[in-house]
Each structure stands twice: as C-alpha cells, then as structure tokens.
Image (spheres, coloured by chain):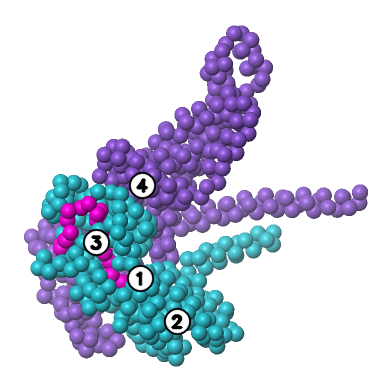
Amino acid sequence: MRLRKITEPVFERLIKICGYSSGFIVLLIVIFLFKEGISFFNLSPVDEGSMLWVHNSNSVQELDAAQIKDIFDQKINNWQTVGGKDLPIRLFTLDEVGKAFTAEQLGPKFEYLPKCIDSYMDSLPGAIGFFPEKQTAGLLKSAKAVEVDKVSFSSFISDTEWFPTSRPAARMGIMPLLLGTLLVSFFAILIALPLGLAASIYLAEIADERVRKILKPVIELLAGIPSVVYGFFGLVVIVPFVQNAFNLPVGETALAGSIVLAIMALPTIITVSEDALRTTPRAMKEASLALGASKWQTIRKVIVPYAASGITAAAILGIGRAIGETMAALMVTGNSAIMPHSLLQPVRTIPATIAAELGEAPFGGLHFKALFALGCILFIITLIINLLVERVSAKRR
Amino acid sequence: MKNLKFLFLAIPLFLASCGGDGSQNAGAEGTEATTSISVKGSDTVLPLSQKEAEEFMKTNPGAAITVVGGGSGTGITALLDGSTDICMSSRDLKIDERLKFTDKGMELKEVTIGFDALSVIVHPDNKVSQLTREQLEKIFTGEIKNWKEVGGDDAQIVAYSRESSSGTYEFFKEHVMDKKNYASAVLNMPATGAIVQSISQTKGAIGYIGLAYMTPSVKALSVSYDAGKTFVPPSIQGAKDKSYPVARPLYYFYDGKNEGKVKAFVDYVLSDIGQQHVSESGYVPVK
C-alpha cells in the first residue's frame, strides 16, 4: 500500500511530462518551420553575395526576377523590352572574364580582377554582368548595380513560375504547385470516397463476421505499406494504364497521382467511416426494420444519415492524407511545375517539391527558406483541414 | 523542466547536424587509427568513393575514411571551411569559388579520377537516332515540341529530366542547354531508374541518363556538337578520348598543405586497381 502511494504520483508526473513534452516538440517544430519560412520574405532573389551590373550609360535601374530570368535565357534580347534604349543585351559572366584574360593579368590572387572586369565592361555598352559582391562592390567605374525587386508574399503566392535554382535570379511562384496539390488531392478524394464509403457500409452492415474478420485487417494493412511501394506500383502499373486508356503522349499525370493517392487514402476513409456507421444505436436500426423498411432502406435512410458527420470527418482526413503524401506523388505525377489545366497533364505537388529539392538546397539559403515557406503553406492547409474535422465531429455530439 | 531545456538544445543541434556537415565526427572516429580522411561532395561520385574507400581500408587497416554525399556545392563549401579533407565534385570549380580558396590562402589541388558520360535516350521505337546540341537545347527549353520538327513521326515530345537537386541536371543545363532554364513542362523524375522506366513505356519520350545506366529497353542517340557535321554515339571509348561531347570529368579537390594525409588514398584511386573500381561503378577511367 505504501509503495503505491509513492509510485502513483511518480507515474502521474511521468505521464504529465510526456504529455507536455510532446506538445512542446510539436510547438518547437512549428516555430522552427515558421521562423525559417517567414525569413524567406524580403530576401533578394539574386544569388547571395552576388550583384548584377549594367553599363553606366544604361538607363535601366531596376529589374524583377522574371525579367532577369528571361534575359539570361535569351528570351529578352533588347534593352527596349525592359524599358531601356534600343540596344541588344549582351550577357557577361565571370567565366568569360576568366577566358578573356590570362592568369597573369588576373593576378596570382585575383587582385586585378575588378580592373579586368571594369575594362571589359567599358567596351560593352549593352552588357549585363553577374559578379560576386566582394570583388566588385565599389570597385567598378564603368558599371552600376541593378536593383532587383525583393521576394514578396504576394509574388510568392501569385507567380506562376517555379525555378528555384535559376541563376542569377531565382523565380519562386508557388501557384502551380499549390494548384497541383489541390487538384491531385481533390480528385483523389473524389475517387476514394465512393469506394471507401461502399466498403465501409459493406463491412459495417452487410458482411458477416467471418468475412469482416479477414477483410478489415487486410484493408488496414494497406495503411502500413511504405509509400515508395505505392509510388513504384503507380509508376509501373497505373501510369501506363492511364497513358493507354486516354491515348496520351505521357502517362505521368495528375490523374495517375489521384488514383494512387486514392488507394492510399482508402484505409483511413474505410476505418473512420466504418467506426462512425457502427455507432448507430441498435434500437434505431431495429425500429427502422420493424417499421417494414428493407435493409437497404435502413442503410440509406437511417444509418448513413446518422453517421454523416463521421463520414465527412473520414473524407476530410482522407484529403489530409492525400495532400501531405510525398513519395508516391513524387514518382507518378511527373513533377512539371506548370499551371494545371486538366487532369491529364503532369503536375507538381508541394510535398514532392520539398522532398525533391531540400536535399541539395544550401542550408540557410534562399532556396532552403523558400522550401520552408512552402512547408508553412502546407501546414496551414492541413491545420484548416484538421479544424474542419474538429467542427464536423463536434456536431455529432 | 530539465528535459525541456535539453530538447531546446537537442532539436536545433539535430537540425544543424542534418543540414550542415556530417563529416565533423569523422575526426573523432579516427582517433585510434593512424590516418582518418573525410571525403565529401557530389552524389554522382559518392558510390564510387564509397567503393574506393572500402577497398582501400581493406588493404590499409590503419586508415579510416568517411565518405559523405550532399552535392558538389556542399563539398566545396566543406573544403573551404576545413571540415573535409577531400571534396568530390562532378563539375569544375567556378571562378568565384576559386576566388574564395585564394582568399583563404589554400593551395588547391585538383585530380581527375574518372569521367561520367551522359546518354540522351529515347523510346526504342523512335525513328530519330541523332540530334544536334542546338536541337536538344530547343527540346528541353520547350521550343521544339513535336518529333516531326527533328525528322521523326508526328508526335508530341515528352522531355524527362532529373530533379534540380541532381548534379546531372546542372551538368545537362550547362553543357547542353547553354545555361538556359528547362521549360516548365519538362517532367522531373526523382531517380535515374524512374527515367529509364518512364522512357521505356512512353513513345514520345526523351531524357538523359548516366552511361552506366543504359539498358536495352531504351535507345541512345548520337549527338553532334558541331551543328550536325559529325554525330557521335555515346561510348566509354568516346568519353575517354573526348570525341563524345556530353561527358564530364569527376574530380577530387584538396588543399595542397594537406597532401601528406590524403596522398595515399588519392594515389590508390588513380592506381590500376582503383581505376578498375571506376569502370566497375559505371564510369569511365582516366587511363
């Protein structure tokens, strides 16, 4: 008895600590996510430690990231297009300086580099140069620095191009990624919900105990398969199937992604909605049957309406599962960051983008922070979904 | 409360060690061994370096070599701040990186340990068997969209690329696409295996893979870098004598002052047996 007096408070405290610390960890991760994500804004899209230069006589003062990308992709070839004089644009890079001058001219420690750039730049009135800040800031007489618009929240949300590794200026518009994610998840749930609902009704009401005992664990097993297996299955089976069925030039499409994600969301939907269906009081069912309703009528008019909020919760949880899915989406959707116009096109989702790019993004750099900002967006979407689930299931009580 | 404080410390530390450099612990591990070398950088060179390190340690029990990936850029940064002894790289140093080494007063040594050649591949049923660099550039920047524009059937071109994190992505962009950006419509695949799989099942597909990954389920194209005068099919021999243009050297960079420590390993990689591992890993040996 005495022992219990000591052990019980100890256990109680231990459990309390566990509860607090898990909450604390979640909080810490969220803070970390948002700290990194928010610091992304108001950075310059130009490579850190680098500057863009144009010839002194050039009237262009300011460029945005989209213009810089088009200039360096040689899609914009004349200064007139960006508000300057009628003069062809000449790209001028450090590599070119390295080739134009001998090592001796550059100096053993590159001490004459600014001079070399300067003299070269002077002869090219249409030039736009891209050099490390340290070697050029305040040292060039023939050129002036171009101001580049900072990354803003509105451009991050509304821009339609995602080129995070484009040099000299990165383009980070998440619109195609956001729409891609929502499109794939929405259609995934459109496929999964009828299937999942039918399966859960069968399991809850129609299947006899023996079948149910086998089927239920098998369906729950679906949730335990690693997502990369689903991804590979999708790539080898679903992708060619979609390609042949619709006679498409390419099979990695939003539809293929939706089908794979639908399969992955099925266990969640089935388990949650079956539980909801099972909460229908026995008295209610029996009353319905006693009134002469058939089994199907009882299911349709009594059981499903009673469990409606639980089924909605299942659907929303399923969407949550689909939105956050990384590996399978990465493997079957084709990952082209284009604005989705149809289901039969490749798309790129937010989680796939983070997974594919975080590995190589320099720690703490612009790209790294942009991916965290993407994570924040995803977090907000899932938070909204979870709040919806809370509201919907609160209604039941 | 104590464990909460611990968490506060542990999580940022954990994250820092993930994103930063895992090679710091290399020194600690090798305290008993006579030499400990850390090698860091390109993921392309990573499997090769791991193999070389394993074999080297078999014959030199006193050596402890840690090999870490992370990309050429990561390796170069690590070499700069002294947290690795050798940097593996699948690209040449840029002039601004050379500037940083000079700033630090390092004597940079570079050794070419092998070559990696890229094959441009299409579906085996594709009629097209050769393309010029300019045509490839236009295909991947989205200017050419139909196979009939390059002498094939009237079918849409579906271009596959690696993800932007891959060194191959950068290499192709710099050497084939004249540093222009890929079109948004290009499909990005997470692995070379996925590219091969997709191209073998997509009629209008085109993509690029390391020479080592060639399989009969896809067809390799001959490439011309002189506007169509000569077309060269990808081959190990072609990469070695530089007649095949889409090939790149693989490097080890190290600080000259550190040479005594790393020389044995670098020499081993360049030796006959080391170069044999290079060809076994699917790359082209230097000799």
The residue that mark 2 highlights is B85
**Is residue B247 or residue A306 the one in the foreground?**
B247
Q: Are marks 1 and 4 in contact (CB under 8 Å)?
A: no
State how far apart marks 3 and 2 are (Cα): 38 Å
Q: Quick one: quadrant of the C terminus of chain A?
A: top right
Q: Amino acid at mark 2?
A: Asp
The shade of chain A is: purple
Residue B184: x %, y % from top left: 27, 52
Give the residue type at disc 4: Thr
Residue B282 is tagged as: 1
Along the polypeptide, which appears first: circle 3 or circle 1?
3
Q: Do callouts 1 and 2 point to residues on the same chain? A: yes
Neighbour class for label 3 at 10 Å: few (<14), some, many (≥20)? many
Q: Secondary structure at mark 3?
A: strand
Label 1, label 4: how many angstroms apart (C-alpha)?
Answer: 29 Å
Q: Amino acid at mark 3?
A: Ala
Residue at 42%, 70% (x, y): give it: B47
Q: Chain of mark 3?
A: B
